[in-house]
Image (cartoon, rainbow, N blue to C red):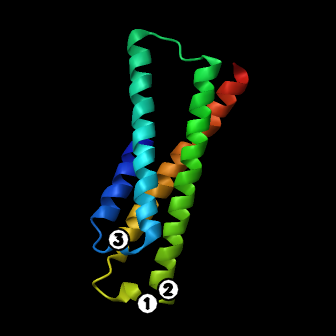
Amino acid sequence: MGQCIFAAASIGAMVSAHGFFNSTAFCYLIAAMGIQVLWSFGLACLDFHALRSKTNLQNPVLVSLFVVGDWVTAILSLAAASSSAGVTVLYSRDLGYCKSPLVPCTHFKASILFAFISWFLLAISAHVTFWLLAAI
């Protein structure tokens, strides 16, 4: 649930920033975090259903799907957070856009922070599911 919450917070912070759509990296961040919200929320619902119905999800094919999905989503999230961080550094340090009150750099930075936290939680999940697959 942490992955989903931080990814949604990243989307919310970026969408609340005026002019975020002028940068492709910021739009990519929203798309990647949207995929991560859907993926992590879907897995949370599946886990809740499995716990409620006492179903065992340790099927090798199913766990393989989880591993691939986690790794693909983790790579997309890291790429999006890193590219957005690069654009934000360019705006703040090199071009000096953040000195203008019209550019909401604090929103960009908050969104990127949430994206990196969400990626970190997803990386832990991907690592655990990989070792779970090896143990099955």
Residue 84 to residue 70: above or below: below
Give coordinates of residue 94: x percent, y percent.
51, 88
Q: Secondary structure at mark 1?
A: loop
Quadrant holding the N terminus: top left
Q: Residue at x 67, y 26 (%)?
A: 133
Q: Amino acid at mark 2?
A: Arg
Residue 48 to residue 54: above or below: below
Give coordinates of residue 18: x percent, y percent.
27, 73
Give coordinates of residue 117: x percent, y percent.
48, 53
What is the total number of numbered labels drawn onto the structure image? 3
Closer to the chain start, of discs 3 and 1, is: 3
Using the image, tell me which numbered label, if any, was put on residue 93: 2
Tell me if mark 1 has few (under 14), some (14-19) or many (20+) residues whose alpha carbon lies within 10 angstroms of its own. Answer: few
Q: Which residue is mark 1?
A: 96
Residue 61 to residue 19: above or below: above
Q: Residue at x 45, y 38 (%)?
A: 39
Q: Amino acid at mark 1?
A: Gly
Q: Residue at x 39, y 18 (%)?
A: 49
Q: Which residue is mark 3?
A: 20
Who is closer to the viewer here, 38 or 44? 38
Quadrant holding the C terminus: top right
Q: Are marks 2 and 3 in contact (CB under 8 Å)?
A: no
Q: Amino acid at mark 3?
A: Phe
> Which of the 4 image quarters holds residue 11?
bottom left
Tell me if mark 2 has few (under 14), some (14-19) or many (20+) residues whose alpha carbon lies within 10 angstroms of its own. Answer: few
Q: CA distance from mark 2 to mark 3?
A: 18 Å
Q: Are marks 1 and 2 in contact (CB under 8 Å)?
A: yes
Find the residue positioned furthest to the top. Answer: 54
Who is closer to the viewer here, 117 or 13? 13
